[in-house]
Image (spheres, rainbow, N blue to C red):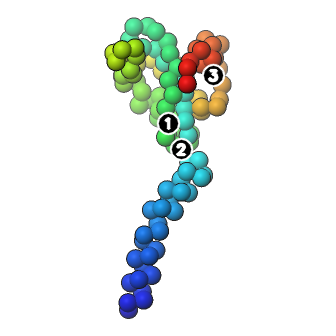
């Protein structure tokens, strides 16, 4: 009986570490970049991380009416989400591609 308990406890100790390592290695979390319009009518590109793959539509829906930080700690509401793509992807509109090229990362 003691042998079974020892084996189970050792297995449980290894589980969280293995899951965390596997998550990082498999790339199950993806980064997205989104073309947004803020409440002052400014269009920006913002990066979002740790979203599951293929959750682009959910990300766009979640971002509506959220706020983003702008200069000097001010926050502005997101009024429109034009498009979100994976971090290494290309936006479909030329305006978004130009904003993306000019966004500091």
Question: 52 or 69, which lies in front?
Answer: 69
Q: Are dots 2 and 1 in contact, CB under 8 Å?
A: yes
Task: Assign a secondary structure to mark 1.
Answer: strand
In whole angstroms, how far apart are the C-alphas of marks 3 and 1?
17 Å
Q: How many marks?
A: 3
Residue 83, position as x, y percentages in the image: 55, 23
In whole angstroms, how far apart are the C-alphas of marks 2 and 3?
20 Å
- Crowdedness near tag 2: few (<14), some (14–19) or many (≥20) residues, C-alpha within 10 Å: some
Residue at 40 percent across and 77 percent down: it is 9
Discs 2/3, front: 2
Question: 63 or 20, which lies in front?
Answer: 20
Discs 3/1, front: 1
38 displayed left or right of 47? left
As displayed, is residue 92 above or below residue 21?
above
Q: Is residue 35 visible?
A: no
Mark linked to residue 49: 1
Quarter of the rendering occupied by the C terminus: top right
As displayed, is residue 50 above or below residue 2?
above
Residue that carries the numbered disc 3 in the rendered image: 91
Residue 87, position as x, y percentages in the image: 59, 31
Mark linked to residue 29: 2
Specify the farthest residue to the front.
72
Residue at 38 percent across and 11 percent down: it is 39
Q: Are dots 2 and 3 in contact, CB under 8 Å?
A: no
Residue 49, position as x, y percentages in the image: 50, 36
């Amino acid at each position: 009986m003691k042998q079974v308990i020892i084996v189970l406890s050792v297995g449980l100790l290894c589980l969280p570490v293995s899951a965390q390592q596997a998550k990082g290695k498999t790339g199950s979390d993806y980064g997205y970049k989104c073309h947004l319009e803020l409440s002052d009518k400014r269009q920006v590109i913002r990066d979002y991380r740790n979203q599951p793959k293929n959750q682009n539509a959910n990300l766009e829906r979640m971002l509506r009416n959220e706020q983003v930080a702008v200069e000097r700690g001010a926050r502005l509401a997101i009024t429109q989400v034009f498009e979100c793509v994976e971090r290494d992807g290309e936006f479909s509109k030329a305006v978004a591609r130009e904003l993306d090229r000019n966004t500091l990362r």
